[in-house]
Image (cartoon, rainbow, N blue to C red):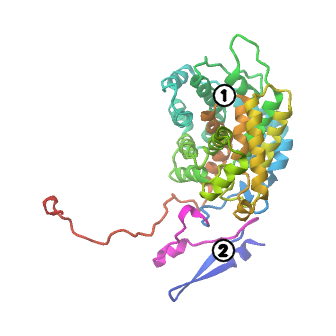
Amino acid sequence: MSANQQEELTADLSVLGNHKTLPLKKATCGPDGIVVSSLRNDGWVTLDPGFMTTAQCQSKITFIDGNRSILRYRGYPIEQLCKESNFLEVAWLLTKGELPTAEEFERFSDQVNHHTLVGEDFRSFLGSFPRKAHPMSVLASAVNALATFYPDTTDIDDPHQLDIAAVLIMAKVRTIVSHIHRRHRDEPLLYPDYSRGYVADFLRMSFAIPYEPYVCNPLFVEALDKLLIIHADHEQNCSTSVVRIAASAHANLYSSIAAGINALSGPLHGGANEAVLKQLWDIVHSGKSVRDYVEEAKASNRRISGLGHRVYKSYDPRAAIAKSYLKRIMDSDAEIKPEDHQLFDVALELEDIALSDSYFIERHLYPNVDFYTGLIYKAIGFDPPMFTTLFALGRIPGWIAQYREMLADPEGKIGRPRQVYTGEGPRDYVPMESRS
């Protein structure tokens, strides 16, 4: 369809006898968009709590079809990317729009790996936080602070500075997360090793003992790399929307990513994987069968963590990928704790119930990405408070891509939602002595 034909598509709205013709934006995939911006001029606004049917932008980055379990980055199915690609290549794809050539990928990988070191002043800054501070609070503060250490990369009107800032964030966050993990455990911090890959060296920095050689389990490297890929972007979710809103105000990239990290920290967003693990423990410690636990939850209308998703009304494709790697880990010769096998068995039984019980089927409550990822993080060796920082590590390239797309949008405006006011009408001030 030509651009002229797209412009001719319209929708008709009738409100209290008033008629309005609204332009229609044709989507490549998924629902078309009715442009309602002009309604404000007629004294109307659209009221859509939680933005259930409101599109805040046009985007070319990620497509989701929640009814058919489809997730694509720049048109590429997530299943193909997890099978054929790696996290750094996907990071390039999300930001640049195309898969890199061999030369582009080598140069990008070298850039990221050679900027993973954080300076001694920054290490001291990280050490100033209480050892038991929540990792997400430390991570958000650390990313915000990067702008003060690299002030010559904060000009959003300079594409070169934006490129450098993006590489620095990709590189430094990996090191920051490993430092937060080790400090949380009161272990010595390690420096990066450029000879290793992005994920392999992250695991070394997180778990190696300084005076002993460290050999990383290649299955752990592969599994974590795929988890980073499936978390890399997910369209206009809560934290991504926050990043875009910050970008619309022309906040620098560091500040905008930090805002996204803060949004991701919420238990209804990135913190859900930790909630799933706690729930599995609750089932184990309750002494009840999984079926009895589920029936009690149904009777009290209590939500079961890890089942259901705002967008997916079928099986979350990311959950299928995570489950496949978790099964490989459990079946491998890796040293897995007996309790991890027990939790995995409970999760499998819980999934089987959800996929066969009409209560869950009718409500489209299928396993989501958080259902299995926490179990993988735990099997690798991470503590539950670190789970959401690993989610954030994966989401960094998506946030960067969304930020840059927002800045480049010729129709972009500062985010400023409207409201429907339902408070008091005009009234006069009452002196304190006259108030009852």
How crowded pointer 1 is (Cα within 10 Å; few <14, some 14-19, many 20+) is rated as: some
Q: Nearer the viewer, residue 427 or 26?
A: 427
Q: Nearer the viewer, residue 322 or 296?
A: 296
**Residue 48 magenta-highlighted:** yes
Give the position of the N terminus as an image quadrant. Answer: bottom right
Please provide the residue range marked out in magenta.
27-52
Q: Is residue 8 above or below residue 163?
A: below
Q: Is residue 189 left or right of residue 316?
A: left
Residue lying furthest left: 433
Determine whether the residue tagged by mark 1 lies in a helix, strand or loop. loop
Determine whether the residue tagged by mark 2 lies in a helix, strand or loop. strand
Q: Identify which amino acid the numbered label 1 is placed on.
A: His
Residue 425, how many percent across, how many down? 31, 72
Q: Which residue is mark 1?
A: 115
Q: Quadrant of residue 52?
A: bottom right
Q: Going 28% across and 72% down the picture, which residue do you hit?
A: 426
Give the position of the C terminus as an image quadrant. Answer: bottom left
**Residue 26 magenta-highlighted:** no
Q: Going 52% across and 29% down the picture, which residue do you hit?
A: 149
Give me the disc on residue 237. Answer: none
Q: Is residue 358 left or right of residue 80?
A: left
Residue 406 showing in the rendered view? yes
Q: Is residue 42 above or below residue 54?
A: below
Residue 285, how many percent across, how many down? 65, 38
Q: Going 53% across and 35% down the picture, which residue do you hit?
A: 147
Give me the disc on residue 24. Answer: 2
Q: Quadrant of residue 154?
A: top right
Q: Identify which amino acid the numbered label 2 is placed on.
A: Leu
